[in-house]
């Protein structure tokens, strides 16, 4: 084992934490991560961003957490049940001190696809060669109307030229005869061009019809958006795609510098879609989980669960990516189902009932929401029910000696600040976890935050809750 570790002792932190009445201990992850880097070693932050996605975790947080000395005997599997775009999975397989095999679960197929591509070593020469083949196929005079997906308001989001050009590129990638990993690389690049050619407001994560006049108080922005709409009438789809291929190729080449990952000694795998009931199945092209290949994941089989769970109604992950999902071959019904299965969704069944969960902090938050609106209360209640279900799965899968680490922001629910981390820690305690310590890091910004929902609020702190199974 070489490289620097974070040397604080969890036992000591636990004593201090209990002594101060469970007040989170402030810890600056950003500077701790700079101290961990040695010599000219470059941190792999830049590999992380191969496709936009809301609510990603800052890579330096898992980088630090996975470098804690007290975790160094835990060299088995890491699981991220809310894997998003695989930031934690990638940090696990590339940690300078200890590289761990990692497993991911994620409801959004686009995020699953990005995670997979980001953690797969590629031969970049092959990527260049295949990209040339795609460009040649793109010139085929074939009718590609079958490759243009059907979805509601298609003409609102894309111009005729946009639809035809995207259809042609989709045909070219689909026709390319290469193995699925390479195809998936190109699907990520394809997907990352979708919003650039759509007539949707680029400043708002979920697609909203772009109206440049809305920004008339900011003439530069307004002008830029007018140009965006103009470009969308006859977009340079192939040019944008080539740009994405070049950028992503360079980023993924960095993964080849991590030998264990390159040689397949350590790797990451997306195994399932829903954190509320975790199984294992094969993931095919475009992030599709093959439900005919299900096996069980044994209990006590993972050493570390490190995850940043979704917040209550804070990010609309599926809605944000719906246009990309349609183009990647998912139907409207499927996209609807992903949204319904997403934890923290606003889509709740209105005729459901609310009954106390016997966790004081959660019940009082639901009561507060009830005093405002039954529908909002249902959303809050459903969120915690789903999170409790997921925490139970985590409890079942975690090794007795292992650790569960939740990275959670504080957010607002109906105008009231809610310490979601405390509520989740209380839920975990009821399931059988003990809280070792909670660290607090102040965050400076967060990618593509949803600011539109006036009661959604901004997330300012990140809480890192470290738990163990009660024995
Ligand atoms: C805070 S994000 C995680 C971001 C990730 N750490 C990253 O850096 O990209 C939470 C994720 O949970 C996913 N999610 C929501 N409901 C889920 C469920 N039922 N099962 C699995 N994942 C779910 C969302 O789609 C979202 O990607």
Image: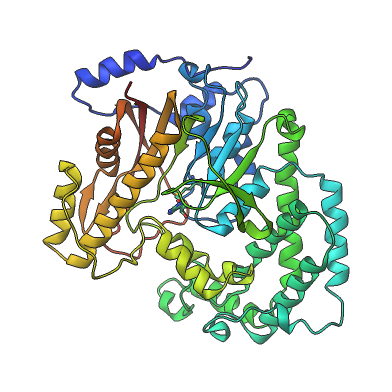
Q: Is residue 161 above or below residue 135?
A: below
Q: Is residue 18 left or right of residue 63?
A: left
- Name the residue furthest left: 371
Residue 83 in view, yes or no: yes
Q: Is residue 235 left or right of residue 171?
A: left
Q: Nearer the viewer, residue 80 or 242?
A: 80
Where is residue 151? Give x, y as percent. Answer: 56, 80
Where is residue 282? Give x, y as percent. Answer: 64, 50
- Quarter of the image with the C terminus is top left
What residue appears at the point 39 percent right and 34 percent down from the top-left corner? 395
What residue appears at the point 41 percent right and 77 percent down from the top-left corner? 214
Where is residue 376? Give x, y as percent. Answer: 23, 63
Quadrant housing residue 246: bottom right
Residue 205 in view, yes or no: no
Quadrant housing residue 177: bottom right
Q: Nearer the viewer, residue 170 or 349?
A: 349
What residue appears at the point 84 percent right and 67 percent down from the top-left corner? 135
- Quarter of the image with the N terminus is top right
Q: Is residue 287 left or right of residue 206?
A: right
Where is residue 327? Give x, y as percent. Answer: 63, 71
Question: How many labels, in total?
Answer: 0
Q: Is residue 154 above or below residue 292?
A: below
Judging from the image, the colouring scheme is: rainbow
What residue appears at the point 46 percent right and 80 percent down from the top-left corner? 211
């Amino acid at each position: 084992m070489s490289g620097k570790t974070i040397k604080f002792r969890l036992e000591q932190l636990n004593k201090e934490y209990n002594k101060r009445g469970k007040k989170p201990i402030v810890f600056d992850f950003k500077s701790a991560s700079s101290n961990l880097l040695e010599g000219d070693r470059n941190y792999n932050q830049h590999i992380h961003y191969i496709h936009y996605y809301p609510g990603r975790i800052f890579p330096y947080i898992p980088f630090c957490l996975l470098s804690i000395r007290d975790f160094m005997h835990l060299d088995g599997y890491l699981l991220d049940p809310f894997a998003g775009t695989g930031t934690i999975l990638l940090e696990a397989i590339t940690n300078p001190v200890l590289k761990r095999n990692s497993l991911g679960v994620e409801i959004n197929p686009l995020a699953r696809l990005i995670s997979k591509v980001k953690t797969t070593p590629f031969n970049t020469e092959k990527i260049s060669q295949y990209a040339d083949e795609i460009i040649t196929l793109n010139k085929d005079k074939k009718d590609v109307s079958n490759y243009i997906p059907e979805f509601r308001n298609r003409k609102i989001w894309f111009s005729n030229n946009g639809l035809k050009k995207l259809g042609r590129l989709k045909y070219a990638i689909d026709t390319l005869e290469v193995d699925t990993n390479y195809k998936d690389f190109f699907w990520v690049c394809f997907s990352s061009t979708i919003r650039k050619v759509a007539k949707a407001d680029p400043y708002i994560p979920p697609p909203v019809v772009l109206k440049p006049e809305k920004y008339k108080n900011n003439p530069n922005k307004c002008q830029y958006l007018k140009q965006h709409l103009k470009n969308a009438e006859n977009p340079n789809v192939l040019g944008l795609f080539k740009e994405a291929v070049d950028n992503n190729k360079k980023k993924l080449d960095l993964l080849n510098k991590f030998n264990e990952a390159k040689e397949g000694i350590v790797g990451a795998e997306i195994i399932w879609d829903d954190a509320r009931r975790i199984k294992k199945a094969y993931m095919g092209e475009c992030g599709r989980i093959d439900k005919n290949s299900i096996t069980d994941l044994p209990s006590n089989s993972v050493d570390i669960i490190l995850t940043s769970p979704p917040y209550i109604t804070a990010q609309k992950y599926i809605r944000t990516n719906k246009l990309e999902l349609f183009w990647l071959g998912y139907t409207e019904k499927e996209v609807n189902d992903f949204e319904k299965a997403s934890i923290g969704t606003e889509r709740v069944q209105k005729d459901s009932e609310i009954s106390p969960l016997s966790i004081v902090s959660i019940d009082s938050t639901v009561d507060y929401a009830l005093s405002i609106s039954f529908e909002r209360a249902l959303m809050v209640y459903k969120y915690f029910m789903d999170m409790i279900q997921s925490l139970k799965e985590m409890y079942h899968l975690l090794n007795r000696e292992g650790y569960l680490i939740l990275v959670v922001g504080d957010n607002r629910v109906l105008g009231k600040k809610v310490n979601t981390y405390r509520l989740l820690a209380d839920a975990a305690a009821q399931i059988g976890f003990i809280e070792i310590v909670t660290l607090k890091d102040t965050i400076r910004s967060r990618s593509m935050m949803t600011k539109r929902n006036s009661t959604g609020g901004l997330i300012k702190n990140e809480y890192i809750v470290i738990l163990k199974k009660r024995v």
